[in-house]
Image (tube, helix red, strand yellow):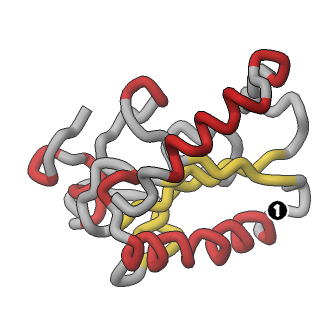
Amino acid sequence: MSNTANDCIFCKIIANEIPSYTIFEDEIVKAFLDLSQVNPGHVLVIPKKHLPDIYAYNSEYAGQVFARVPVIARAIRDSNPQIKGMNICLNNGKIAYQTVLHSHIHLIPRYSEQDGVLMKWADNTDKYDNEKLTQIAQAIQSKLGD
């Protein structure tokens, strides 16, 4: 995994040192086809600033980056009438399957329920009562100003 801008594959793509199938680029982000193409039209949106993960964004820059996601997502959707939906995913940390430590947002078009994307969440509803959910919510709320 890349740890710094100097050895980051995405920074090299931004600098055009490594070619990419770029579909959108401006002063804030670069969006290009993921070579793995989980499904046709799978795009990565990356900030031009080297940020390792979501925790490194400030509010202003996050707003700039994420404001571009719906524009790119609509273009992907509109490029193929067979696209029925889209998963938008931002993995943070190795445990969350982040393989390049430069923040990146996956836009993965969905064509059917059997198209190669596994996105089934565990349902642990029966493990959490009101008291436990309140404790979790309060712990998170107490850190919002940090």
Q: Nearer the viewer, residue 96 or 140?
A: 140
Q: Residue furthest left?
A: 6
129 vs 5: above or below: above
112 vs 52: above or below: above
Query: Seen in the image, is 117 located left or right of residue 67?
Result: right
Q: Residue at x 35, y 52 (%)?
A: 55
| Image x and y of residue 41, in percent | 66, 54
Q: Residue at x 74, y 72 (%)?
A: 74
Query: Seen in the image, is 132 located left or right of residue 52?
Result: right
Image quadrant containing the C terminus = bottom left
Q: Nearer the viewer, residue 100 or 144?
A: 144
| Image x and y of residue 10, in percent | 30, 53
| Image x and y of residue 75, in percent | 70, 73
Task: Identify the amino acid type marked 1.
Answer: Asn
Count of numbered marks:
1
Q: Residue at x 26, y 32 (%)?
A: 1
Q: Which residue is mark 1?
A: 80
Q: Residue furthest bottom?
A: 27
Query: Seen in the image, is 82 located left or right of residue 45?
Result: right
Circle 1: element type: loop
139 vs 56: above or below: above
Q: Nearer the viewer, residue 59 or 20?
A: 59
Crowding around mark 1 (Cα neighbors within 10 Å: few <14, some 14 to 19, many 20+) is few
Q: Residue at x 40, y 82 (%)?
A: 26
